[in-house]
């Protein structure tokens, strides 16, 4: 009876201690232990109490029935560690790519975000394949899929680590991608040592696909994170001019209309970070015959005097003084200006009729940044904070500290490339405005919750990163020109000497 039974051949254990079981010339399974061997044979109809030492039934190769070198604890630990790393890398790729895939303002950044989301999906599939690869390996390509997921994780973590090393600012994500980078190096060494790709039917095609995917991903990342497109430059057109003045005799004031105009004539939408207009009156002492005046000396003295415009000197005008008459916001910090959008504002300046001004000037200054480089928390940024408000929290600046009255605007800023957001400290836009002074705005990590740092170097770097620029226009006119009577309109039937209707 025993001679009619099929021989059961148990092959030598492989590197992981797994032994192939062959019955009647066909592989019927693989076993980690004698108990698993009995279960395999039980499914084929053999009794589970077979004598494993019976040579009429069993043929043991590479070790007898007691040779089961499987290290269960180590094998399970490696599998769990591999799956955990792939799942964490999947989550990190989703965190990197999801905001850009659905919220980036440029097509290139959206493609970049989609690539990260897809790479996260591949890592999720690799985590599932790792369960099979750490087990019986019933799916031949599981090792190759795990290898692909680990390579993607290593590339993503290396990119994040490289970008973080540029400035080495602490962010919570450092505690994620730095350990993941170490994990991916360990996982890659393990998979390469075990030649995880050897079970793939066509390993060369698989390798070519991996290389092509890596090249496409690298080109996309290089384009979106390093290349700054020059085909869509920023450009604002500004105008400021005075209109015809009128004397309001009832109040004794000269009413001077001023028109401000702005248009986005560039190829990129912009955020207005800060803006200001200033109308000034100039007065001086006139002399037709100046006696031995040293123009260079007077210019130097003018530069050193407070309250006067530096760099101004004239031969026939002495003691030049400029006084701010009117100052304010033109468009408003935090407002957006789309491509081709324009804005016009008319303002009336009140000047005393007996003022000694000879010239009136208007200055319009706009600070702005590219909208395709970052996203500003507009509602937060538009809220004004007053430095003289004792209840204004961190924005309050007491006069004893030498602070003058000013209005501050402050808001969080996100870069359009989420890779930068994850590898840098939070960035904020701060704008400062006060009457008669040039508007100031800067981007830095300063958030009013710590001592004011020296941000000169940081603000210059961030201005280049976010594409911050400034536009300015000035216009000057004599008061005599504003008060000149308008020429009379010549129409048929009218007389220029006596503008009354003639028959």
Image (tube, rainbow, N blue to C red):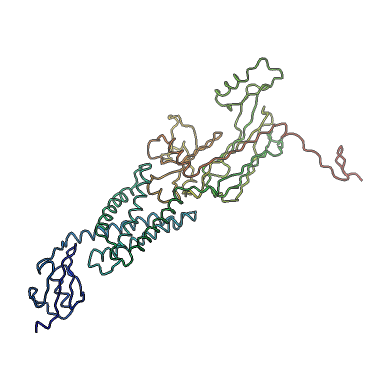
Task: Check the image and report above or below for 238 versus 86.
Answer: above
Q: Is residue 88 left or right of residue 304?
A: left
Q: Quadrant of the N terminus?
A: bottom left
Q: Judge whether 39 appears above or below 95 on screen.
A: below
Q: Is residue 391 above or below residue 51?
A: above
The percent position of residue 181, horizontal first and vertical second, equals: 30, 51
Q: Which residue shows up at 33% across the image and 63% down it?
A: 203
Position of residue 40 in the picture relative to residue 56 (left or right): right
Residue 114 x %, y %: 43, 59
Q: Residue 355, located in which quarter of the rendered image?
A: top right
Q: In the visual, does 223 lie left or right of 21?
A: right
* Residue closest to the eye, 144 or 343: 144
Query: Image quadrant of residue 283?
Result: top right
Q: Residue at x 27, y 53 (%)?
A: 183
Furthest residue in direction bottom, as rendered: 1
Q: Where is residue 12 shown, x and y percent of the image?
A: 15, 67
Residue 68 coordinates in the image, percent (x, y): 13, 65
- Give left or right: position of 49 versus 160: left
Query: In the orientation shown, which residue stands out farthest toward the top?
Result: 292
Of residues 375 and 184, the one nearer the viewer is 184
Give the number of marks: 0
350 or 17: which is nearer to us? 17
Q: Quick one: which residue is furthest to the right in this view? A: 503
């Amino acid at each position: 009876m025993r001679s009619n039974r099929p021989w059961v051949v148990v092959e030598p254990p492989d590197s992981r201690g797994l032994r192939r079981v062959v019955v009647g010339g066909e592989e019927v399974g693989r076993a980690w232990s004698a108990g698993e061997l009995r279960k395999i044979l039980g499914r084929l109809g053999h009794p589970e109490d077979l004598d494993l030492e019976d040579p009429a039934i069993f043929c043991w190769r590479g070790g007898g029935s007691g040779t089961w070198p499987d290290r269960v604890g180590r094998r399970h630990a490696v599998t769990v560690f591999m799956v955990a790393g792939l799942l964490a890398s999947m989550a990190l790729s989703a965190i990197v790519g999801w905001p850009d895939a659905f919220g980036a303002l440029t097509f290139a950044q959206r493609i970049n975000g989609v690539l990260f989301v897809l790479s996260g999906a591949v890592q999720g599939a690799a985590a599932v394949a790792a369960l099979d690869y750490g087990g019986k390996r019933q799916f031949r390509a599981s090792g190759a899929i795990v290898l692909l997921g680990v390579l993607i994780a290593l590339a993503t973590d290396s990119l994040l680590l490289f970008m973080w090393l540029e400035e080495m600012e602490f962010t919570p994500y450092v505690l994620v991608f730095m350990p993941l980078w170490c994990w991916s190096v360990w996982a890659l060494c393990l998979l390469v040592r075990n030649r995880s790709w050897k079970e793939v039917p066509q390993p060369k095609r698989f390798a070519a696909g991996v290389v092509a995917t890596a090249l496409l991903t690298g080109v996309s990342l290089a384009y979106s994170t390093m290349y700054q497109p020059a085909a869509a430059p920023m450009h604002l057109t500004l105008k400021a001019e005075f209109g015809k003045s009128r004397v309001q005799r009832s109040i004794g004031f000269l009413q001077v209309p001023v028109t401000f105009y702005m248009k986005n004539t560039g190829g990129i939408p912009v955020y207005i970070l800060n803006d200001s207009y200033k109308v000034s009156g100039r007065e001086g002492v006139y002399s037709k015959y100046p006696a031995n005046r040293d123009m260079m000396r007077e210019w130097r003295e003018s530069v050193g005097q407070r309250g006067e415009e530096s760099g101004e000197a004239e031969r026939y005008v002495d003691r030049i003084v400029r006084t701010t008459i009117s100052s304010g916001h033109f468009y408003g910090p935090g407002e957006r200006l789309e491509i081709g959008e324009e804005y016009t504002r008319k303002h009336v300046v009140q000047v005393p009729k007996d003022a000694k001004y000879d010239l009136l000037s208007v200055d319009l200054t706009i600070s702005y940044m590219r909208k395709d480089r970052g996203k500003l928390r507009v509602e937060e940024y538009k809220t004004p904070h007053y430095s003289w408000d004792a209840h204004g929290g961190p924005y309050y600046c007491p006069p004893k500290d030498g602070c003058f009255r000013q209005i501050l605007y402050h808001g969080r800023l996100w870069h359009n490339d989420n890779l930068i957001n994850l590898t840098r400290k939070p960035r904020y836009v701060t704008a400062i405005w006060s009457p008669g002074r040039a508007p100031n705005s800067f981007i830095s990590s300063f958030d009013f919750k710590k001592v004011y740092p020296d941000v000169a170097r940081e603000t210059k770097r961030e201005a280049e990163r976010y594409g911050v620029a400034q536009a300015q226009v000035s216009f000057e006119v004599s008061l005599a020109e504003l008060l000149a009577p308008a020429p009379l309109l010549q129409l048929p039937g009218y007389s220029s000497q006596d503008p009354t209707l003639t028959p």
